[in-house]
Image (tube, grey):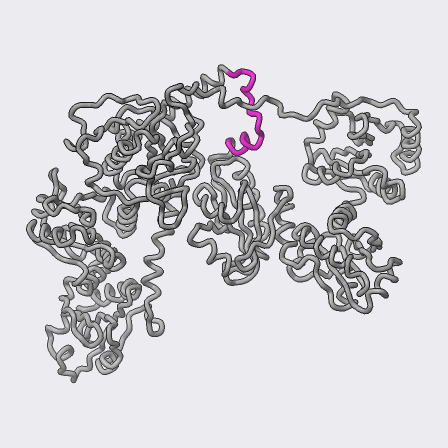
Amino acid sequence: MSAQKDSWVSSFSFLLFWASSIPTQGSERLLQELSPQDYFSSLQAGRASLAYFSHPVSPDAQPFLEQIENSAEALQDYGISVVKVNCPKEDVSRYCGKENALRKAYLFRGNVLIREFPTDALFDVNSIVANVLFALLFNEVKYVETLADLQNMENTLKGRSNMVFAYVPATGTAEHRAVMEAAFAYGTVHRFVLTTEATLLKDTSNNEPDVSSAQLLFCHCQQATDLAQPCRRTAMEQALTLLNIHRHLKLMGAPLVTEVAEDPEKVSTVHLQLGLPLVFILSQKETYEADRRTAEFVAWQLLGKAGVALLSRDLVSLNVLLRSNVALKTPEEGVPVKYLALEDTDEIITLVEDKSKVRQIQEDEEEDEEEDEKDNNNQDIQDDQVVEAVSRDKKQELPLEQILALTEDTFHSTLVEAARTVVLFYASWEAVSLAVLQTYTEVADHLSDVFIFHPGAGGVLLSRVNCWDWPGLCTKENVTQVPTLKIYEKGESAGVYDGMWGTEELTSFIILSQVSCPLKLATIDEAEGYLRGDFPSELSSFHHTSLLGVFSTATSEARKAFEEAGNILSGHVAMGMYLEDEALALSHKYAVSPPALLLARSRGRSVEGISLSKQSTQDMVQLIRYELLDIFPEITVQNLPHYLQLRKPFLIFFSDGDIGQMESKEMLNLAEKPPHQAFVACWLNLKKTPVGRGVLKSYFATVPSLPLLVWVDLHAGGQVFRFPSEQSLTETNILSWLEKLKAGLEIPSSTLSEEDWKPPLPAYDFLQMMEMTMPELPLQTSHHHRDTPAQRPPESPGGDNAIQEEPSQENKAEKVGSPGRDLRGTAPRLAAKEKQGKRHSEL
């Protein structure tokens, strides 16, 4: 629940931001001390200030001064300054000369006195803030004493505005302060009414209320069209705090019923964001009007406790049992939507209000899953390792502090503020997304000391978008699959990551993407430095092969292809380009002619020159990728696909740890000679890459003693040859052995099967597992809800057809003749019979 609580706590931060953005003069965070003359000369028109006039010989005022000083910062948030005015002994003015005046505090707006406060009424910070705001908000907060006053206020607001009615046992309390602070923020939206009369609270309640506790009611007067009927009221059940009031008002402002036209798993509403469940009433075209009234009835009953949405089967294809008529989505991430078959609305309300009922449903589902497992003994092993790993670690909380969560409201503004932004688009319910999100946190931790900055401060900003919460945003950003990682420059998309989802690969991509690809070098000294590894400061911690393209003015076609190849390889390769008068001298130094590539491995200790004979972009990309492959690489899960694409035989040295210095030298000598282009010479560390043991078992049935040199041609017969263990591993012996293999004089140790690689278990046939659709009410029909103009729900103002929201009116939910609490909008109708005494009009 903490994740949802964080979301609405963050949405509440705008209150403090709004208050703190009120213009102020200088730094007025603490109590000011001024002379009477300085104080009255500093008063500004429209600016409120609270002043206490004090004599040096009034030690009794010290406790009050401490509370005044403590309240200075709180009042400053509302643009109210707090001043202690030091009165000279000889001053006999109105505020300094009378003894009674020294026992009061004065509230001014400009130079106009608004209110005098006895100091004993301002006994702590809560009482000071509450009474000062109460005085300033005299026109926004109406105080009532009788039921007639309250009813008169309701009548004036009907059809125009809603009302927030608050009861506090006494003024100057923490609850009184919370109401005043809420009125300061929402006073222009809702009418606030306050009372301290216990009898008035009893008159407005059906039950015997607890008059010792503060209470708040939201009165829906704006929707009251019948002046003879009282405004419908929704009580806030939480404690009367500013945060809870904000949460309650946000819920009251949400649409009563939401029209949904997409998969419920992707729906996100304000209720889910505030930690409340969302109830879906499953409907169909034939019963839309009745289902709509039923949804409105349920929504009024659950107002402030859960959201209600109307989901049309005609608009969304649901792979659920046809008898299901209600769905429940809880705010916890990763919990799937539950589809239920209920008989009436009482069960829905019980489902939401009774937590044990939810647990009972969860237990029933777990029992069903266990029965399914018994029926599928051949699939009792998890066949998806990613899902298994995520499920195993689902209780671990990811450290996401360094990754900024973006929403539809903050996405574009954040991208514009940051020079470069990395955005991970993911779905919080999907296993691969969660696995990549964990990797992403490791990348953030690795880069936090160097590259990660706040928006507007330059550098790289790591962020994320949960497409489950913000599907519209992901659609606008052309994210058709998750996870997807994109890089933006000043709000514009600059590249999509298409590599492996490992920490090292992601980190390398983010670092490399900071520099232009190719990086244009202006002088021959810069080009020589680039070959030596003198990268830009952004790549100071980056160690990789330097690739430099050298072009003359006559090789414009090759240069253009090189630049286009750089755009394709941006983030994956460090590429430089030199195109100046001395390019010819630089190429001659390395015995090549422009256009050419210069590859500097090991920071310039060896530079290899390669002539560019092919000048198409794709040929250039393929050449660069091939030349950047290591001569004698260590094979890992991440880089194996790059070497498999070469479709060459593998000469693999298996070791149980780091390779020895002697073996490394001999294998490297072998790989650097001309014949190396016919095969891939590599090594595999079983301690670093444990999957290598499985590879050896497939070669030899058991894992042989290590180290071991193996020749295998995966693309031509799959024969596996083992280097003789009695021979020393030298370049000469290996070449001699390879000649025997070529001549067919060696017998293979094994031959790999030609079977295709397939999943270990068959896929689930979900359609076969579902119940057969009833012929009279097919799951999918040729008629759609949108084809009936009279029943078409109104489109949302934003034009988003995925979620259509419409504020509902109370009278719609009480039409005579509607099926009271029966859930009729289902296929088939499980509760088609009308239940006497359970109609909307009788409730």
Residue sitting at x 51%, y 42%:
426
Q: Does 378 lie within the magenta span? A: yes
Residue sitting at x 28%, y 70%:
31
Where residue 599 appears, as percent x and y from the top left, is 80, 54
- Residue 766 is left or right of residue 555, and the answer is left
The image shows residue 133, relative to residue 810, as above or below, that is below
The image shows residue 54, relative to residue 805, as above or below, that is below
Q: How many marks?
A: 0
320 and 741: which is toward the camera: 320
The answer to which quarter of the image holds residue 538 is bottom right
- Residue 633 is left or right of residue 99, and the answer is right
Q: Quadrant of the N terminus?
A: top left
322 and 574: which is toward the camera: 322
Residue sitting at x 19%, y 60%:
140
683 and 717: which is toward the camera: 717
In this view of the protein, can residue 388 be seen by the observer?
Answer: yes
In this view of the protein, can residue 123 be seen by the observer?
Answer: no
Q: Main secondary structure of the magenta part?
A: helix
Where residue 781 appears, as percent x and y from the top left, is 41, 28
Q: Quadrant of the C terminus?
A: top left
Q: Does 154 lie within the magenta span? A: no
The answer to which quarter of the image holds residue 121 is bottom left
Where residue 596 appears, as percent x and y from the top left, is 82, 57
Where residue 738 appears, as percent x and y from the top left, is 90, 32
Region rendered in magenta = 376-391
Residue sitting at x 25%, y 40%:
303
The image shows residue 126, relative to residue 277, as above or below, that is below
